[in-house]
Image (tube, helix red, strand yellow):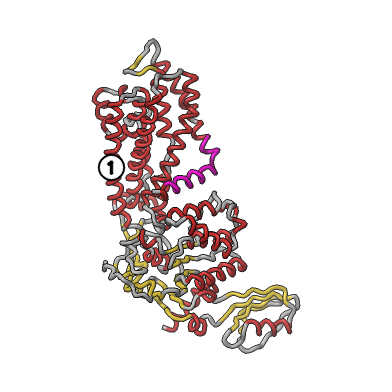
C-alpha cells in the first residue's frame, strides 16, 4: 500500500488517488457434503469492491456519491473515515491519513449511517448527546451552546427526553444528524440519510442538510438511492458502479443529459382517452389511470400538470425521478 | 478516561430498560444456592470441616464465585456480531479505543450484576448457614480483587472474541472457557477439594485468579495472600491486554464489511 503523502491542499478536504480495495469471501459448495468439505478446505473468492477510484472534494462542497447496491460506496466512505484499510492508493482527509490517524481524524468528521443508528435505542436522545460531548471532549459551556443551537435548528426540543425507540423515523434521523454535528465536524459523511422516510420528512432533512452546509461550510459526501436527494442537495455528483467511477461532474449536466425525465402516474375520476403534448410520452394507460414520461427539458412538470388538469379530473398523482440504475444504464449505453 | 466512565454509565442506563430480566437472572442464584446447600449438607454429614472449609465458608465462597461468573458479559456476542456483520465499522468512527469501549461497557454491567446477585444471594445464605467471621476492614480489599477478577475475565474473553477476525464464530471457545471457569477456575468448588496435583496446577492458572482467588480471600483473608493475589491478577491482566491488542491490531486489517 502506498503511504499517504500528507498535507492535503488547503482547498481540498478529501484527496483520493487510485484507491483499490479487495475483499476475500469464503465460498462453500451446496449441500451437506459441501459443508463437510469446507470444514477441511476453505475456498475464497476475491472481490474487488473499489477498483482504482480517484477524486478530490473541495472544502464546503456537497457531493452526491451514488451507485447501485454493492457498487463500493460504503466501502469508500469506510476507507475515508479510517475504518477499512485499502490495498493500495493515496488517501488524504483534512491533511491526515485516515488509517494512521483514525482517532485524530474522528474529531473532525461526522458520520450518519441511515441503517445503523448511533443513538442509544432505549434512552432519550439527550443521553446520547451528553455521552458524545464527553467522547469528543467538548467544553461543557461550548457544548451547551452548540446543543441549544442545533436543537433549535433541527426542531427537536420537544423530543429530547423521549426514548429513541418511541420516535418516528424522521425525528430519529434529525436527532442522528444533531448527534453527528455536536463536535462541529469539517466533513460529514451521510450514508442514506433519508432511507425509509416519507416525502415530508425527506424534504425536511434535505433542507436542514443544505442549511447546515451554508451556515457551517461543512463538506458533505452523501450517498443515496434517491436521485431526488441528490438533485436537491448536490452541486456535483460522482457515480460509481462495480467499484469504478462512471460519472464525475456537475448535477446540471447530469440533469440535462440523464435526469431529464420524470415518471408521473395519474389516477383520473373521468375517463382517460388521449393526451398529445410535446415532451410527453404515455408509457401505459387504461380507462382511469395512465403513466407518463415527462421530458423536463421540453416541458416543465408544472406546465404538464396544468394542461392535464384542464382536460381531465384528477384523483391522485405521483411523481418519481429516474431510478439511479436507469441513469447508470444510460451512461453505459453511451459508452 | 472520563469518556470511558460515561460509556459505562450510559450502558447501565440502557440496561435498566431490561431491569426485569436483570433481576430475574440475579434472582435465579437463589435456586442454585438452595440446591447446593443441600448437596453440601449431605457431603458434610458428620464432618465439621472439609479441606479447611466449614459448610458456612463453602456457601459464602460459592455465593461470591457464582456472583462473579454469572454476572454475565456480552463482549463475545457483541464483538462477534461486530466482526461478522461489519458493524465494527460503525464503532470505529468515534475518537475512542475499541477495546476501551467494550471494557467500560462490560465492567459496568458485570460489576452491577455481581453486586445485585451477591446481595440477593446473601440473604438466603445467611438464612441457610448463618454468617462467617469476616473483618469488615478487609472487605474493600476483597472488592478490589473482585474488580481485578472482572477485568481479567474481560480480557480473557476479549482475546477469545477477537479470534472472530479469523474464525467467524467463537461461541464454541466461549463454551469451553465457561466450563474451565466452572471447574479449575473454582466456581463450583474450592480448588482445595481437588487432588493435590490439580489444585497446584489450577491455582497458578489465570482462570483461578478470575474466580477462586478473590472468593478464597473473602472467606479466609490474609494480608500476605491479598498482596500476592492482587499482584498476580495485575500481571495476568497486563499479559492479556498485550495479547488482546496484538490480536486486534493483526485482525483489524482483515475487516470485511458487507454491502456498499
Question: For this rendering, which residue is in front, A180 or A194?
Answer: A180
Q: Position of residue A271 (x, y in %)?
A: 74, 79
- Outermost top residue: B46
- Which residue in the rendered view is the most extreme toward the bottom? A278
Left or right of A202 in this view: B197: left
Give A42 or B65, whichever is nearer the viewer: B65
Question: Is residue A28 found inside the magenta-colored segment of the image?
Answer: no
Would you say the magenta stretch is mainly helix, strand or loop? helix
Q: Residue at x 37, y 37 (%)?
A: B150
Percent of width and height locating residue B211: 35, 32
> Most extreme residue toward the front, as rendered?
A141
Residue at 33% x, 66% y: name it. A96
Label 1 packing within 10 angstroms: few (<14), some (14-19), many (20+): some
Which residue is under mark 1?
B238
Residue B7 on the magenta span: yes
Mark count: 1
Instruction: Name the residue located 36 percent from the left edge and 34 percent from the top edge.
Output: B144
Which chain does the residue under circle 1 lie in?
Answer: B
Q: Which residues are magenta?
A: B5-23
Q: Residue A14 at x, y = what percent?
A: 38, 71
Q: Quadrant of the C terminus of chain B?
A: bottom left
Residue A257 vs B68, above or below: the answer is below
Which secondary structure, mark 1?
A: helix
Q: Is residue A241 above or below residue A163?
A: below
Tell me: B16 left or right of A242: right
Amino acid at each position: 500500500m502506498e503511504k499517504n503523502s500528507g498535507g492535503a491542499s488547503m482547498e481540498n478536504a478529501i484527496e483520493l488517488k487510485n484507491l483499490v480495495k479487495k475483499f476475500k469471501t469464503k465460498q462453500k459448495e451446496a449441500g451437506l457434503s459441501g459443508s463437510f468439505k469446507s470444514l477441511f478446505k476453505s475456498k475464497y473468492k476475491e472481490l474487488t469492491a473499489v477498483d482504482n477510484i480517484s477524486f478530490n472534494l473541495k472544502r464546503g462542497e456537497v457531493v452526491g456519491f451514488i451507485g447501485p447496491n454493492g457498487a463500493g460506496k460504503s466501502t469508500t466512505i469506510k476507507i475515508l473515515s479510517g475504518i477499512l484499510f485499502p490495498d493500495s492508493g493515496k488517501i488524504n482527509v483534512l491533511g491526515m491519513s485516515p488509517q494512521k490517524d483514525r482517532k485524530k481524524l474522528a474529531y473532525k468528521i461526522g458520520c450518519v449511517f441511515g441503517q445503523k443508528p448511533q443513538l442509544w435505542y432505549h434512552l432519550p436522545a439527550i443521553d446520547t448527546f451528553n455521552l458524545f460531548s464527553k467522547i469528543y471532549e467538548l467544553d461543557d459551556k461550548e457544548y451547551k451552546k452548540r446543543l441549544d443551537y442545533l436543537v433549535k435548528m433541527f426542531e427537536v426540543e420537544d423530543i429530547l427526553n423521549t426514548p429513541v425507540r418511541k420516535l418516528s423515523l424522521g425525528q430519529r434521523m434529525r436527532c442522528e444528524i444533531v448527534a453527528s454535528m455536536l463536535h462541529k465536524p469539517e466533513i460529514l459523511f451521510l450514508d442514506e440519510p433519508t432511507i425509509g422516510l416519507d416525502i415530508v420528512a425527506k424534504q425536511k432533512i434535505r433542507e436542514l442538510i443544505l442549511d447546515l452546509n451554508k451556515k457551517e461550510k461543512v463538506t458533505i459526501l452523501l450517498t443515496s438511492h434517491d436521485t431526488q436527494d441528490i438533485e436537491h442537495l448536490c452541486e456535483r455528483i460522482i457515480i460509481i458502479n462495480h467499484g469504478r467511477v462512471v460519472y464525475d461532474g456537475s448535477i446540471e449536466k447530469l440533469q440535462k443529459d440523464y435526469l431529464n425525465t420524470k415518471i408521473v402516474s395519474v389516477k383520473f375520476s373521468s375517463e382517460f382517452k388521449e393526451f398529445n403534448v410535446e415532451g410527453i410520452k404515455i408509457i401505459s394507460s387504461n380507462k382511469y389511470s395512465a403513466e407518463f414520461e415527462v421530458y423536463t427539458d421540453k416541458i416543465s412538470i408544472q406546465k404538464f400538470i396544468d394542461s392535464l388538469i384542464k382536460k381531465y379530473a384528477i384523483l391522485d398523482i405521483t411523481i418519481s425521478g429516474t431510478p439511479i440504475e436507469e441513469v447508470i444504464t444510460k451512461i453505459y449505453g453511451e459508452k | 478516561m472520563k469518556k470511558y466512565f460515561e460509556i459505562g454509565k450510559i450502558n447501565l442506563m440502557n440496561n435498566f430498560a431490561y431491569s426485569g430480566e436483570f433481576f430475574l437472572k440475579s434472582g435465579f442464584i437463589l435456586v442454585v444456592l438452595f440446591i447446593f446447600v443441600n448437596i453440601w449438607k449431605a457431603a458434610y454429614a458428620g464432618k465439621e470441616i472439609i479441606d479447611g472449609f466449614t459448610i458456612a465458608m463453602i456457601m459464602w465462597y460459592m455465593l461470591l464465585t457464582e456472583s462473579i461468573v454469572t454476572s454475565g458479559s456480552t463482549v463475545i456476542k457483541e464483538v462477534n456480531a461486530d466482526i461478522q456483520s461489519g458493524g465494527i465499522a460503525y464503532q470505529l468512527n468515534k475518537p475512542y479505543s475499541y477495546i476501551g469501549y467494550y471494557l467500560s461497557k462490560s465492567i459496568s454491567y458485570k460489576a452491577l450484576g455481581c453486586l445485585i446477585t451477591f446481595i440477593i444471594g446473601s440473604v438466603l445464605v445467611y438464612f441457610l448457614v448463618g454468617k462467617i467471621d469476616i473483618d469488615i476492614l478487609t472487605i474493600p480489599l476483597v472488592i478490589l480483587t473482585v474488580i481485578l477478577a472482572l477485568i481479567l475475565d474481560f480480557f480473557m474473553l476479549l482475546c477469545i472474541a477477537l479470534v472472530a477476525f479469523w474464525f467467524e464464530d467463537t461461541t464454541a471457545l466461549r463454551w469451553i472457557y465457561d466450563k474451565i471457569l466452572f471447574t479449575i477456575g473454582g466456581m463450583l468448588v474450592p480448588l482445595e477439594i481437588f487432588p493435590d496435583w490439580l489444585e497446584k496446577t489450577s491455582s497458578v492458572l489465570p482462570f483461578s485468579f478470575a474466580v477462586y482467588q478473590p472468593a478464597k480471600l473473602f472467606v479466609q483473608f490474609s494480608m500476605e495472600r491479598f498482596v500476592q493475589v492482587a499482584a498476580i491478577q495485575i500481571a495476568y491482566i497486563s499479559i492479556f491486554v498485550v495479547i488482546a491488542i496484538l490480536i486486534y491490531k493483526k485482525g483489524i486489517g482483515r475487516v470485511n464489511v458487507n454491502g456498499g
